[in-house]
Amino acid sequence: MPRRRVGTTGVAAGCRGYAAPVGALSGRVAVVTGGNGGIGFGLAAALLDAGAAVDIWGRDEAKTAAALERLRRPDRPRVTGRRCDVTDEPDVEAAFAGAVAEHGEVHVTVANAGRGGLAPFVDTTLAEWRELVATNLDGVFLTFREAARHMKERHADGRGGGALVAISSIAAIHGAPRHAAYSASKAGLLGLVRSAAVELARYGVRANALLPGWTIIDTHPEMREDPAFVEVTTRRTPARRWATPDDLRQAIVFLADPGATFHTGDTVVVDGGYTIQ
């Protein structure tokens, strides 16, 4: 799978020259798992601003309700939310069915829900490994499977297919100490995307991966508590800063754009050049 990297502007090389037209996603409906905070919240906002209605999923209902209040604006399409634990198969099935029932159909599914983990490799227990992989990899599989079933039905009815976007990480392609389970789960998403892209292309379904670099997010403020760590990662990044969720806006709209019918099986890296150092 080719990797599309970024320049210092935060615009993915695979999207270079792409300027989302006003209302690029008008009439579309997107599901964003983990859309009630962090990167997921930023992706949901970007999709709304591009004209898509959005359904956000999260385990914490109070947090989802607060996110909906922040996302709702008179100049944006409809945004809804529902509780879902992506590691629970019946939960995912019910959440996707609920999104379809509420919006009529789903054109874009962004599998963003995930969790971090920091532990020495030799001290990582099997239970810890499985818990993290269940969210970061199994959860994407379950989400994509439900979306693909729906999108295949849409294609059979002559209504087109759709777009699947997995939010991976640059940890999938470079070594990160004390991140074995996290890195393995995020690397697994790249294989899942490749397979889905090949199998589902005939149904008009595209599958791509988006790999953010070091990103400032409200859900994990502890990542920036160590000044030495922040300084080292910032110095290694050619852009000389960490990303914010806003740096992912153009990439996610491009990957969701129904006009990008031939763009599938790709890995778009938005990291300010970190992985090429």
Image (cartoon, rainbow, N blue to C red):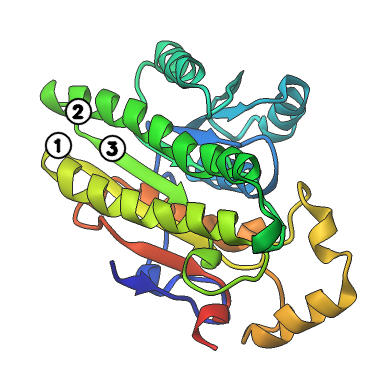
Is residue 254 something that shows in the picture? no
The image quarter containing residue 200 is top left
Q: Residues within 10 Å of mark 2 (few under 14, many from 20)?
A: many
**Residue at the spot of label 3:** 162
Using the numbered discs, state the Cα–Cα distance from disc 2 to disc 1 in whole angstroms: 6 Å
Residue at x-position 46% and y-position 14% = 90
From the viewer's side, name the closer residue of 131 and 123. Answer: 123
| Apparent side of residue 259 relative to residue 133 in the rendered image (left or right) | left
**Residue at the spot of label 1:** 203
Q: Earlier in the sequence, mark 2 or mark 1?
A: 2
Q: Is the Cβ of the residue at disc 2 closer than 8 Å to that at disc 1? A: yes
| Apparent side of residue 101 relative to residue 56 in the rendered image (left or right) | left
Using the numbered discs, state the Cα–Cα distance from disc 3 to disc 1 in whole angstroms: 9 Å
Q: Residues within 10 Å of mark 1 (few under 14, many from 20)?
A: some
Residue at x-position 64% and y-position 29% = 74
Horizontal and vertical percent position of residue 83: 62, 19
* Image mark for residue 152: 2
Q: Residues within 10 Å of mark 3 (few under 14, many from 20)?
A: many
- Examine the rendered structure and indicate whether residue 31 appears above or below residue 82: below
The type of residue carrying mark 1 is: Tyr
Horizontal and vertical percent position of residue 1: 28, 66
Q: Give the SS element for disc 2.
A: helix
Q: Earlier in the sequence, mark 3 or mark 1?
A: 3
Residue at x-position 69% and y-position 47% = 38
Horizontal and vertical percent position of residue 91: 51, 17
The image quarter containing residue 175 is bottom right
Q: Give the SS element for disc 1.
A: helix
The type of residue carrying mark 2 is: Lys
Q: Nearer the viewer, mark 3 or mark 2?
A: 2
Q: Give the SS element for disc 3.
A: strand
